[in-house]
Structure formats: structure tokens, C-alpha cells
Image (spheres, grey):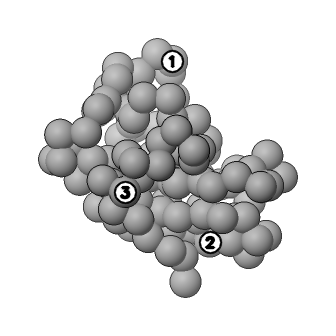
Amino acid sequence: MPRSITPLDAARMMENAVIVDVRKAPARLECGLTIPGALRLLPQDAGARWHEFEGKTVVFFCVHGHEISQTACASLEERHVDAYYMAGGFVEWQAAGLPTETLHENG
């Protein structure tokens, strides 16, 4: 089972972890915001790109921290990558008043 991390703990790890936005494009674009410095990755590509994360700590987030981020997290954990999903997702990140930035690209 994928490991979770709170938004506050994820914020504390930002300098040492790779934060990955796996929200589906429509939800992401409708929101118009993301976590500063977050890498964009299509959820279905996480497993295929696992080698990019070897030796790193990875925190995935989606809108609510449910299926999408948990599936991406599990695909990296299967390959022994130190991965977490953010419980509560981006909604909880925003509710906690943590930093956001405007999206700079499409999708």
C-alpha cells in the first residue's frame, strides 16, 4: 500500500524531495495553480519513468490525494523508489495556506 504524507510534511521536504503534480489536465487547468517547483507528469507515465527518480524521495499529488496520486506512488514503490502521495492532495495544500504558483504551461 502506498505511503502517505501530509501537506505540511511535504512542504518541509520541498528542498530535498521531488514534488510531482499528477493531476489530470482538466482539473489542473481549471485550478490554474500548482506547488512551486513541482514537476508535471501524466499519471500513467510514472511507472515508465521510474528510473528518473532512483535515489530520490518523490511526493506525488493530485486534487484530493486519492486514486491518481496513490497509483503513481505505488508504481514507483514497486521499483524501490522512496515515494509518497500527499494525503488530501492539492485541496488540502491550499487549505493549509501553503505556497502556490500560477501554472506556466498548458496541460
Name which residue type carries label 3. Asp
Residue positioned most to the right: 51
Q: How crowded is the residue under tag 3: few (<14 C-alpha within 10 Å), some, or many (20+)? A: few
Residue 9 is marked as: 3
Q: Which mark lies nearer to you, 3 or 1?
A: 3
First of labels 2, 3 by sequence position: 3
* Label 3 residue SS: helix
- Residue 16, image x and y in percent? 57, 44
Name which residue type carries label 2. Ala
* Label 2 residue SS: helix
For image coordinates 50% across by 21% down, the residue present is 106
- Residue 15, image x and y in percent? 52, 38
**Whether residue 15 is situated above or below residue 64 in the rendered picture:** above
First of labels 1, 2 by sequence position: 2
Q: Is residue 19 left or right of residue 26?
A: right
- Determine if residue 99 is in view: yes
For image coordinates 35% across by 41% down, the residue present is 27
**Circles 1 and 2 in contact, beta carbons < 8 Å:** no
Quickly name the residue at label 1.
105
Q: Is residue 63 left or right of residue 24?
A: left
Residue 74 is marked as: 2
For image coordinates 52% across by 44% down, the residue present is 19
